[in-house]
Image (tube, rainbow, N blue to C red):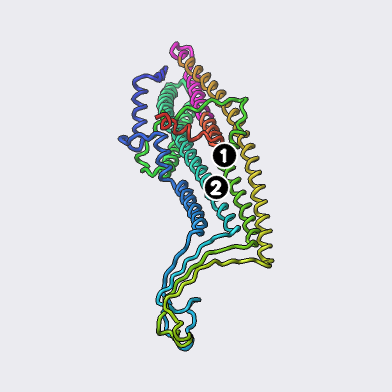
Amino acid sequence: MTLRLPPWLHPTALLTLFIAMLTITPAAHAEPLSLERAIQLALSHSTGPAIAQADLQRTFASYLELRNSYLPQITAGSGLGWTYGYPLSIEGSPPALLDVVAQSTVFNPAQRQLLGASKLDWRAAESQNKDQRAATIQDVAVTYAELAKWEARLLRLQQYETQSQQMEQAVSERVQAGVDSAVDLNKAKLTTARVRLHQAEARGAADVLRRHLSTLTGLPVSSIEIESESIPSLPPLAAEEDLSEKAVKSSPAIKFAEQHSLAEAMRASAERRSLLPSIDFSAQYARFSTFNNYSIYFPAGTFQVNNATIGFGIRVPIFNAAERARAEAAEAEALKAKKQAEAARDQVAEQTLKLQRAAEQLAAARDVAQLEYQIAQSGLEAAQTKVDAKTGTLHELNDASVQAAEHFLQFQDADFEYQRARLNLLRATGDLEKWALSNSASK
């Protein structure tokens, strides 16, 4: 008995593909989710960018807090109270029907340095926000590409399962006819079992990735239907180009470290400048009452209910050993931040070079896997031709089919590992968002 496997474009194979697509798609009528749309949803829904944005708002508010200290702070209140004897103060102010106080900083060298440090913290938070945005885009892109890999694998495994079942049935008939042995039948069953194992692995991985994509985008799991064609092609990688310098110039992590280092240096300077004189503006108006015994202790005709004071408070530090110690600690912290910025620069350059070389190796490994798959596919076609010409055996065809299937899976894995390495490299050089949202940029 001879068995002819259906060609890839045979109507039976097309029907099998269609049925498989219906079974693995969570919602047949769901709107396809492109990679660009998934990234846009993740940037607006994911917790990572939201946390980074909140931190950015916090640092900006801290900067405004210090900047606005140069504007008068006006408070109004009342210090009503009963007096026995001389009218004593209530919370540092004499009892009054109305008390209005205005205060602001006029000259404070330490405050000015702290204001500059706070502004640098705000800029550093912006760099951190950009880094978190790139991390979210990378997470979505890698998840999307891997999910596309597993879904494509499920479709191909559906074909392999049909073929292995046909092979198993043919071997079973040959065993009954006394042509093949029980061992041959077990080998055919093993091939089918391996296909089902790969299917279980692919379904499990696809379900986990779809759940993660749902968490990132906020879409229900059942409505996620990806479009593999929406993944942009990766830009060519030039082996002779050194991307380390480009990564150092565009890295948000380096910018954050450098800005944090400058901020710590300005804080250290502020601690030193706190030993310098400072000037504050102050003004106060109070309307006193006539029932707090003021008239008893003031000469006749000198007491008045409306009183005001305006002036400047000047502070000149004479000796403060504790402040000098704090300044030395701040200078040590600034030196630490400076060295950390230098280490971050070296680390980014080294990691980028490693990523570039790894991407080159994975590109070569992908080419090898692709050629091995093409050779195995040619062997399968040759085995099929021999079976058709009745010069080949069914077992040779089965072995060739198994080899082609295994090499296809290896090629898929190698291709995805290359994609992941290239996405890491694109993020390192600052080109990830431009690549992922290339359709938006072109509009």
Task: Look at the numbered disc 1 and give the secondary structure of its residue.
Answer: loop
Residue 156: horizontal and vertical position, in percent? 43, 27
Q: Is residue 389 located in the magenta-colored stretch of the structure? A: yes
Residue visible at 60% across and 37% down in the picture: 248
Left or right of residue 50: residue 335? right
**Tag on residue 251?**
1
Front in this rendered view, residue 139 or 212: 139
Span of residues in magenta = 385-414
Quarter of the image containing the C terminus?
Answer: top left
Residue 223: horizontal and vertical position, in percent? 34, 39
Front in this rendered view, residue 14 or 145: 145
**Disc with the residue nearer the chain's start (1 vs 2):** 2
Q: Quadrant of residue 212?
A: top left
Residue visible at 67% across and 51% down in the picture: 335
Quarter of the image containing the N terminus?
Answer: top left
Front in this rendered view, residue 431 or 107: 107
Residue type of the residue flagged with mark 2: Ala
Q: Quadrant of residue 221?
A: top left
Reply above or below: 49 against 328: above
Q: Quadrant of residue 333?
A: bottom right
Give the labeled residue for mark 2: 124
Q: CA distance from mark 1 to mark 2?
A: 12 Å
Decide if residue 193 is in sight here. Answer: no
